Amino acid sequence: MKGFILLIIGIILAILVIGGAAAFHFMNEMGIGIDEVNSDTINDIVDKVSNIQSSESSGSSSDGGSGNIIDDIVKEEVKFNAQNGEGYYREVTYKDGGFRQYDTETGDLIGSSYDSDQDKLPSME
């Protein structure tokens, strides 16, 4: 009986260790590592989004005209940059269906569906 209980405890511990390792691996693959998420990076992205919003004309803002782009954010995701083969980018999706993509290391705008952002994107040359 004692051996059976030890076997059950061993199986439970093995499941917890394997599950934890798998969860850690998948979180790193999705870019949710501890070193990826820090308040400085998030604050940089919010500042850049605010700067883009303030640089647009008030009559033709690309966020649907609400005036506050932060309130129009529907989803934020960190994704692997498969096109580059390395690194991660943060994709911000808005109520109007548009998106902006930011480099997670620098916070720079690297992609956007908005016409008003096209001159702010890095050169492809």
Image: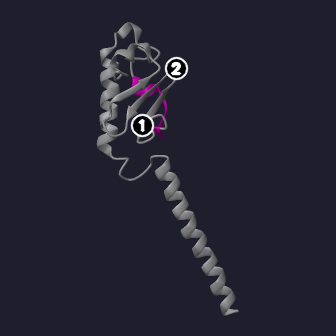
Amino acid tagged 1: Tyr
Whether residue 80 is in magenta: the answer is: yes
Question: In which image quadrant can residue 68 be found?
Answer: top left
Give residue 108's position: percent from left, percent from top: 32, 30
Amino acid tagged 2: Asp
- Judged from the image, the secondary structure of the residue bearing numbered disc 2 is loop
Report, in whole angstroms, how far the alpha carbon at label 2 lies from the one at label 1: 21 Å
Q: Residue furthest top?
A: 59
Relative to 114, does residue 110 appear above or below in the rendering? below
Label 2 packing within 10 angstroms: few (<14), some (14-19), many (20+): few
State which tag comes first along the sequence, 2 or 1: 1
Q: Residue furthest front?
A: 125
Q: In percent of the image, x 46 and y 52: which residue is there?
A: 28
Relative to 76, does residue 9 appear above or below in the rendering? below
Give residue 119's position: percent from left, percent from top: 34, 15
Q: In percent of the image, x 36 and y 27: which residue is there?
A: 109
Label 2–label 1 contact, CB within 8 A: no
**Which of 103/54 is in front?**
103
Q: In percent of the image, x 49 and y 58: which residue is there?
A: 24
Question: In which image quadrant can residue 85 be found?
Answer: top left
Whether residue 13 is in magenta: the answer is: no
Relative to 102, does residue 58 appear above or below in the rendering? above
Q: Which quarter of the figure is the N terminus placed in? A: bottom right
**Which dot marks residue 89?**
1
Give residue 16's position: percent from left, percent from top: 57, 69
| Magenta stretch bounds | 69-81
Relative to 49, does residue 37 appear above or below in the rendering? below
Per the image, the residue denoted by label 2 is 96
